[in-house]
Amino acid sequence: MTSGAPNPIRRRFRILLVASLALNVAVAGLVGGYFLRGGGAGGPPRTIDFAVGPLGQALSREDRREIGQALRDAPAAQALSRDEMRRLRSALADILVAEPFDRSALQAAMADMRGQFSAVQDAATELLLDRVEQMTPAQRQGYADALNRRRSEGHD
């Protein structure tokens, strides 16, 4: 005999399952994007999206390549190796299936991952600033023009 009232345990389980799936998809997207951009066997990826948005995208191909190479050599990128990404993903997966669910453990693991990504972004920002500082006034004007052009084309 089944009553029309929903089972609160099933409802909670369903909510937890949906939340877990959403988090898995988000993490898989981050990790997949990392590897699709050329994550190496144990070292840093061959190409790194240095996450400075329109400022990075408006750079010349040569500038992006030089910054990317310097970033791959940066300690922050070295620390974010393919092996480290696997470790982070595995830790998240273990936390998601643990019973009882430990929100603070998941929060700590996500903060760890965010810290790793943040360190790479900080290094990229410093490299971008170094490159702009080395530009001549004419190069900076060209860079500003490229940035404005991207904006007017709707790329930001």
Image (cartoon, rainbow, N blue to C red):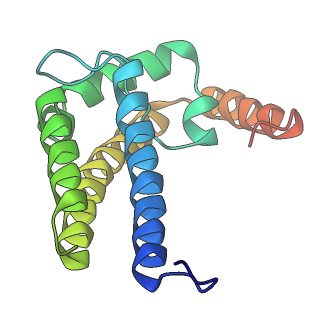
Camera-side residue: 125 or 46? 46
- Residue at image point 48% right, 60% down: 18
| In the rendered image, the vertical position of residue 41 relative to residue 153, given as above or below | above
| In the rendered image, the vertical position of residue 54 relative to residue 102, given as above or below | above
Could you say which quadrant of the image residue 69 lies in?
A: top left
Could you tell whether 71 is left or right of 131 in the image?
A: left
Camera-side residue: 156 or 103? 103
Whole-percent x and y of residue 2? 54, 78
Could you tell whether 7 is left or right of 114 in the image?
A: right
Residue occupying the far right of the picture: 152
Residue occupying the far front of the picture: 1
Could you say which quadrant of the image residue 20 lies in?
A: bottom left
- Residue at image point 87% right, 32% down: 153
Whole-percent x and y of residue 17? 41, 61
User: In which quadrant is the C terminus drawn?
Assistant: top right
Camera-side residue: 2 or 149? 2
Whole-percent x and y of residue 86? 17, 35
Camera-side residue: 36 or 124? 36
